[in-house]
Amino acid sequence: MISTLIETIIQVFGVVLLSPLYSGILDKLKANIASRKGPSIFQPYYDIFKLLKKETVISNYASEVFIYTPYIIFSIYLVISFVIPVVYPEPVFFTPIVDFLGGALLFSLASFLKIVASMESGSNFVSLSAARASSFNFLGEATLITVFFAVALGTGTNNPYVEHEYAESFTFYLALDHVTATVAFFMLWIFETGKLPVESSGLSEMGMIDDGLLYEYSGKPLALLKWGGYIKQYLLGSVLLNVFLFPWGLQSGVFGAIEDLGIMFLKWMLLIFITLVIDSSLAKLRLYKIQDFLAVAFVLSVLSLLLVVIQNE
């Protein structure tokens, strides 16, 4: 009981405290590749702390939905960190609450609330980004749920920890249905975390998608939304690493949970390297090409589902 509680605390604190670091490392390396010095790897932490100290300015047109949704979204990502294998390979304290499908629905709920709350600001500029996000998310969410359905049918369970054990077997890992699900989930992760070479951070209107939803936020709500974005990136990326790409190496026990933080760091360095290769080798895509990209990911997820059904027959 006590050891499970400690392992849960290590996983959750690892997610919450370390998630901004990986975004900082990626931004630093991207700048170095472009022959720029770039920001510090701790810049995301500086930004969060700065925003937490700033005054919150709210539009006269904003409703209570706009005001309180950032806290709800951050809480949703915090709940997900309690129940899926993002650091520790065995069930933690609240694992029975949500399975993989429930986690996918929670991710979808957070995305939906983010779009609805941004629209409550009454800004035309935000409406543009909300329309873009809505146009793309229907394929992204469908891919996420279909991938988890495919993996659940292949393993006979929707428990993320059992699926992680299946993935450690080379027979399951090299199966065609698992390979197609891995590619689909990786493509989804690239899109969901803004790594696809089409989206521009900052205020570049032509490529802005997710950042535009935060345009009217300031102070603590903006800090929570940015922090929540880092956590979402870490959660999806860790699922990609531990269930699909590199499921091996995680240790059990209290000391094993501490070791897992270092092991996950090494896994994330591999994922960051792959992301840098993609980002630096592909030309920037046109905005409308995102739907083509997500359509391919969705087709691969459906193909994985069909392959599982055929194999089970």
Image (spheres, rainbow, N blue to C red):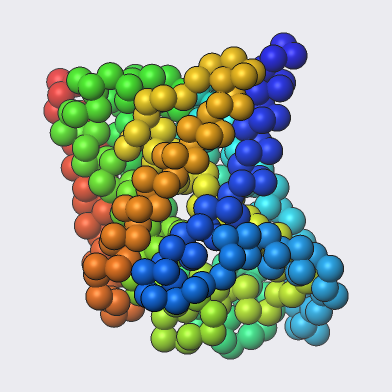
Out of 269 and 101, give the one closest to the viewer. Answer: 269
Q: In which quarter of the image is residue 261?
A: top right
**Vertical position of residue 301 compared to residue 58: above or below:** above
Out of 99 and 238, give the one closest to the viewer. Answer: 238
- Please indicate whether residue 130 sits to the left or right of residue 60 in the image: left
Q: Residue 171: give x, y in percent of width and height.
A: 20, 20
Out of 87 and 75, give the one closest to the viewer. Answer: 87
Q: Quadrant of residue 282?
A: bottom left
* Quarter of the rendering occupied by the C terminus: top left
- Residue depicted at x 42% and y 69%: 32
Is there any visible trace of residue 52 in the rendered image?
A: yes
**Vertical position of residue 131 compared to residue 125: above or below:** above
- Residue depicted at x 74% and y 56%: 71
* Quarter of the rendering occupied by the N terminus: top right
- Residue depicted at x 34% and y 60%: 276
Q: Residue 53: give x, y in percent of width and height.
A: 84, 68
Q: Residue 167: give x, y in percent of width and height.
A: 32, 25
- Residue depicted at x 51% and y 57%: 25
